């Protein structure tokens, strides 16, 4: 007899628990997917730099290596005429097992630019950061684990992973810096 008293509450309770479980699972999968998008290659993350570290790299104070970014040329593609003219460089330094790097691009102000890291061994493409307009052009900074090198830095006008390689503007390779041995 007591069971009939609680029967009207059983179905809403089951529905509530099911909805709660589905929302929890959706949030958990969403968080995992977001973390996987930031991972590069074998679970190594691309790190954002603090404002002080960004300013230090951009000012060029310190012992930084530079790599010129080469323009992407593809005569077979008719869209190559539509790509903005751009020049740029990568300024980087190795510190504490990490490579802190900055990408500086001088290009069309009417476009948006994203930087991607392309692991040539595994052919994986990972988003690094979007370039923001600064005094010297478009600028962005990040850090990765030094064990990932060599890695190709790709500047694209697309922020969509499926269309990045179709919209490449500049490319450059970050290679490991060989330690000088003293005799």
Image: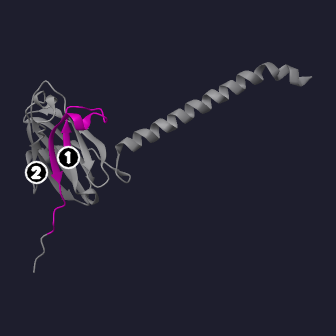
Pointer 2: what residue?
A: 67
Position in image of residue 2 (x %, y %): 89, 24
Q: Earlier in the sequence, mark 1 or mark 2?
A: 2
Are circles 1 and 2 on residues that touch, CB within 8 Å?
yes
Pointer 1: what residue?
A: 153
Identified at 37% across, 54% down, the residue is: 42
Identified at 20% across, 32% down, the residue is: 157
Q: Nearer the viewer, residue 75 or 40?
A: 75
Mark 2 nearby-residue class (10 Å; few <14, some 14–19, many ≥20):
some
Q: Nearer the viewer, residue 33 or 73?
A: 73
Direction right: furthest residue: 1
Magenta region includes residue 182? no
Magenta region includes residue 175? yes
Q: Quadrant of residue 85?
A: top left
In this rendering, position of residue 22 left or right of residue 2: left
The answer to whether 133 is drawn above or below residue 103 in the figure is: above
**Which portion, as a residue range, is magenta?**
154-179
CA distance separating discs 1 and 2: 10 Å
Position in image of residue 159 (x %, y %): 27, 32
> Tag 2, which secondary structure?
strand
């Amino acid at each position: 007899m007591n069971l009939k008293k609680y029967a009207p509450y059983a179905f809403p309770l089951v529905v509530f628990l099911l909805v709660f479980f589905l929302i929890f699972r959706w949030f958990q999968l969403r968080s995992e997917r977001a973390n996987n998008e930031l991972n590069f290659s074998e679970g190594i993350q691309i790190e954002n730099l603090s404002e002080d570290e960004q300013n230090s790299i951009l000012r060029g104070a310190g012992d930084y290596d530079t790599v010129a970014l080469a323009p992407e040329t593809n005569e077979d593609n008719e869209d190559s005429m539509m790509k903005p003219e751009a020049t740029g460089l990568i300024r980087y330094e190795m510190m504490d097992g990490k490579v802190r790097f900055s990408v500086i691009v001088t290009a069309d102000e009417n476009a948006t630019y994203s930087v991607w890291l392309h692991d040539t061994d595994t052919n994986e493409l990972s988003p690094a950061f979007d370039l923001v307009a600064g005094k010297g052009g478009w600028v962005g900074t990040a850090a990765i684990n030094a064990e990932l090198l060599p890695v190709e830095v790709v500047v694209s006008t697309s922020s969509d992973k499926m269309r990045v390689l179709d919209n490449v503007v500049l490319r450059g390779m970050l290679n490991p810096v060989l330690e000088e041995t003293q005799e």
